[in-house]
Structures are given as structure tokens and as C-alpha cells.
Image (spheres, rainbow, N blue to C red):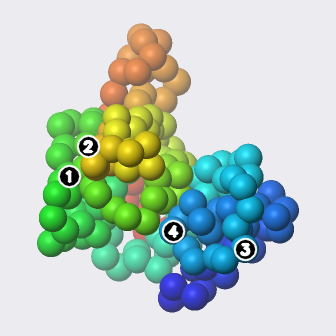
Amino acid sequence: MADAFLHDLRAHVEHAFGPATWTTVALAAGLPDDSAPEAVPGTDEALEGFGRFLFPAVLRSCAPLIHPAWGALDLLEHAERALQAGTEGASVTRDGDRLVITSASPHRVCALARGVVRGVGDHFGTPLEVTEGSCTRRGDQHCVTTITRLAVGGGVGGAVGVPAQRDATHDGAELAAH
């Protein structure tokens, strides 16, 4: 499975940004590559775009594990808890429409993770704001990422940033369609 993932990642990056970008993307993701030039602009955008592109395939392969009533944050919360099980220093906390993820992953795939989060938001029709309070790529000890569900169309009464309400019926129908 890992080989297929890397093949798809490379194909996406080379198609979207050109073959020269692949080496830098591989380094940014912590993948071995001996021919790395200086950082190529667009690396984070390439990884984020691939994460967003990749999510529907991940959803199809994991569909039996996903509860039909889950919304975007529910899915992200459960997936992150499963990924971090037994990892020292990792945590996932949820407060309503806000999910805070703390990790110390050496893989440095923040941009890829942002793209997956955006793909989840796309799937559920739920705008998600992603902010990184600290990051190991910037020299911090842990990555702390906050994902906030925002209202569609600016929120209640047009207020930007008002948390959205999830329609569990809609979410279940969407998951069942995949």
C-alpha cells in the first residue's frame, strides 16, 4: 500500500507542478532522496493539493470503518485517535466545533495533512479552518494543529466564523454513496 501511495503522490506532484518539484516534495515529506536540490517553491502547495486529491480514495478504502452519522470533525477525530494510538506526547481534544491535535511526528507532512483535512471538508460540504500553533518544521517540539468547522455562507446571520451545524442525515447519505 505504501508503494502505491508514493507512486500516486509522485504522479500528482509531477503532473501538477512538474518533475523537478518531486525531489523537494520527497524531502519535505521525509522520504529518502539523494538528489535533492534547494527547496523548490510550491512544495507545500503540492503536498496540500495531493492530500486533498487523495482523500476520496482513502474514504472509499476505509468506508466500512466509518460510522454513517459522522460529520467532518467526527471523522477527523476518530481517524487521528486511531493514528496516534500509543504514540507518546500525542493527543486529540474536541470542544464542539473545534478539534486540537498535538503530535511529534518526524515525518513533517503538515501540508499533506492540511490537504486531507480540506478534502474531508470538501466531502462533507463543511468549510474547515486549519491553523498551526506550533510545528516541528519550525523547530517546535510538537505540532499543534487546530481544525475549526465554520458555517457555510458566513454563518448564522452572515457572521463569519460562526460554527456550522452538521446535518447527520446528509452526512450519512454522503458516506453511503461512496
Asked whether, in this view, residue 86 is left or right of residue 31, the answer is left
Residue 30: which numbered mark, if any? 4
Identify the residue position indicated by label 3 in the image.
35
Tell me the amino acid under the disc marked 3. Answer: Ser
Packing grade of label 3 (10 A; few <14, some 14-19, many >=20) is few
- Between marks 2 and 3 in the image, the one whose residue lies nearer the viewer: 3
* Residue 50 visible in the displayed image: no
Amino acid type at image mark 4: Gly
- The residue pinned by badge 1 equals 92
- In the image, taking residue 26 as reference, residue 150 lies left or right, namely left
Between 149 and 158, the residue placed more toward the observer is: 149
Q: Earlier in the sequence, mark 2 or mark 1?
A: 1
Q: Nearer the N terminus, badge 3 or badge 1?
A: 3
Amino acid tagged 2: Val
Q: Residue 99, percent across and down?
A: 27, 43
Instruction: Kindly indicate whether the residue at mark 1 contacts the one at mark 3 (C-beta within 8 angstroms).
Output: no
Label 2 sits on residue: 100
Which circle's residue, 2 or 3, is located before the other in the chain? Answer: 3
